[in-house]
Image (tube, rainbow, N blue to C red):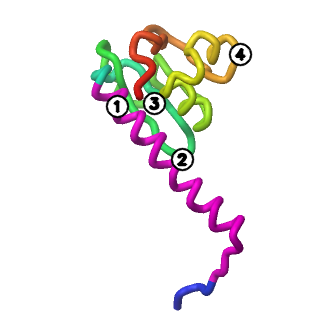
Amino acid sequence: MARNRQLDSDGLRAAFEADDVRALVKHYLAVLETRAPGHAVEVRVPPYAAVQVIEGVRHTRGTPPAVIETDAATWLAVATGELGWAEAVATGRVRASGERTDLSAYLPLG
């Protein structure tokens, strides 16, 4: 049996915004995969997606040696050029560890 759920206008707006954020995050990660093919660096934007990019040693199991992690708002800001990569890393909005985790050569994506 389907649940009967009513959303007020704020709840409906929030639901659409969450879907938009998810779609945009995945879109820009896919663009990055195209521009920086490979499997040496894992880029994580929880809870939406993670991709492996940049040529180098392929990662197959466990925690990869090079990881970039950020939240959705920061990812969208650096992907669109609203926020510079160096500033995002310097302020801790992006956590990057390991070799080849400087994405500035590939940004902005949009």
Circle on res. 69: none
Point out the frontmost of discs 3 and 2. 2
Amino acid carrying mark 4 in the image: Thr
Q: Residue at image x 30%, y 22%?
A: 35
Q: Mark 3 points at which residue?
A: 62
- The secondary structure type at the circle numbered 4 is loop
Q: Does the CB distance between marks 1 and 2 fall below 8 Å?
A: no
Circle on res. 31: 1
The image quarter in which residue 100 lies: top left
Q: Position of residue 56 (x, y in %)?
A: 31, 12
**Quadrant assignment for the C terminus:** top left
Q: Position of residue 54 (x, y in %)?
A: 34, 17
- The secondary structure type at the circle numbered 3 is loop
Q: Name the residue under label 4.
A: 91
Amino acid carrying mark 1 in the image: Val
| Sequence-earlier tag: 3 or 2 | 2
Point out the frontmost of discs 1 and 3. 1
Point out the frontmost of discs 2 and 4. 2
Q: Is residue 43 left or right of residue 72?
A: left
Using the image, determine if residue 24 lies above or below residue 87: below
Q: Mark 2 points at which residue?
A: 21
Residue sitting nearer the eye, 83 or 30: 83
| Sequence-earlier tag: 1 or 2 | 2
- The secondary structure type at the circle numbered 2 is helix
Residue 79 among those drawn in magenta: no
Q: Residue at image x 61%, y 30%?
A: 74
Residue span colored magenta: 5-34
Distance, label 3 to label 2, CA atoms, is: 28 Å
| Sequence-earlier tag: 1 or 3 | 1
| Sequence-earlier tag: 4 or 3 | 3
Q: Residue at image x 47%, y 12%?
A: 104
